[in-house]
Image (tube, rainbow, N blue to C red):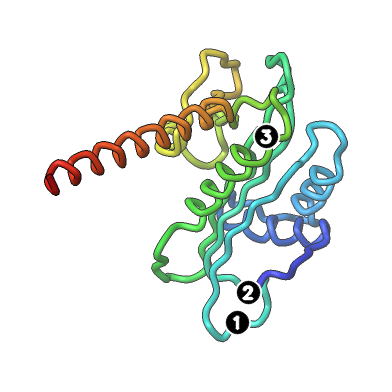
Amino acid sequence: MLPDEIPLSELSVLLSTMQKKCFKDANIDNENTNRLNELFASETDRTVAVVVSLGYLPETTQYMDFIDGGSATIQKSKQDFLPRYQLWINEVCRAKNADVSADQSPVKIVMKIIDIYISKHCMKQSSTIDGAYLYVEKHPEHGNPEYLLNYYSAYGYKELSHADDDYYYMRKKYPSQNALNRRTKKAKKRSSSSSASSKKNTDSQQI
């Protein structure tokens, strides 16, 4: 259903449409759409990816006519307290336009894609990337910060000791490529040992 390419201006419309539901943002005078346009085009705290998962009824032909959707952005930022630029998850949103049950939450799919993208692509491209970060407002206009802290904890994010008057900060660590390589080597070694042991047992039975 989704086109191979979506212009940034259309992507801003899509996300602002979703955020009318999840953030209760009325998008008066296209204020939120314009904000997202500026966010995607900004050279500072650059947006490196926008992840979207949308569900449709079978007869749907237009990709904007989704009935359930999840989205998030990934941006590169230091947030004024990190020594290096890291990847930050923002704009996490679920917009449900119909009372339907899905096999899996679209936000869960979005978070899985983020894990894959960061661990298998970004961390290979840059040795300074050490995981995924996000922040939770302490005094949001809508929602409960304690709920969100628990919600993101379920996805593997842990609260950082750093905090300020406005936000809680969280981080999710991924295994480094070296650690993954070591695990693969150990698994291969165990497999080889197991095969050798199995063959020995078979030979003994034949004797």
Give the numbered dot on residue 124. 3
Q: Give me the C-alpha separation between circle 2 and circle 3.
A: 36 Å
Query: Which of the two residues, 193 or 124, is positioned nearer the viewer here?
Result: 193
Considering the numbered disc 2 on the image, is that residue within a helix, a strand or a loop?
loop
Q: Which amino acid does label 2 sit on?
A: Asp
Residue 34, position in %: x, y? Answer: 82, 51
Disc 1 or disc 3, which is closer to the eye?
A: 3
Query: Which of the two residues, 195 or 97, is positioned nearer the viewer here?
Result: 195
Q: Residues within 10 Å of mark 1 (few under 14, many from 20)?
A: few
Q: Give me the C-alpha separation between circle 1 and circle 3.
A: 38 Å
Give the numbered dot on residue 60. 1
Give the numbered dot on residue 89. none
Q: Can residue 172 be seen in this view?
A: no
Q: Quadrant of residue 41?
A: top right
Closer to the chain start, of discs 2 and 1, is 1
Residue visible at 70% across and 61% down? 14
Considering the numbered disc 1 on the image, is that residue within a helix, a strand or a loop?
loop
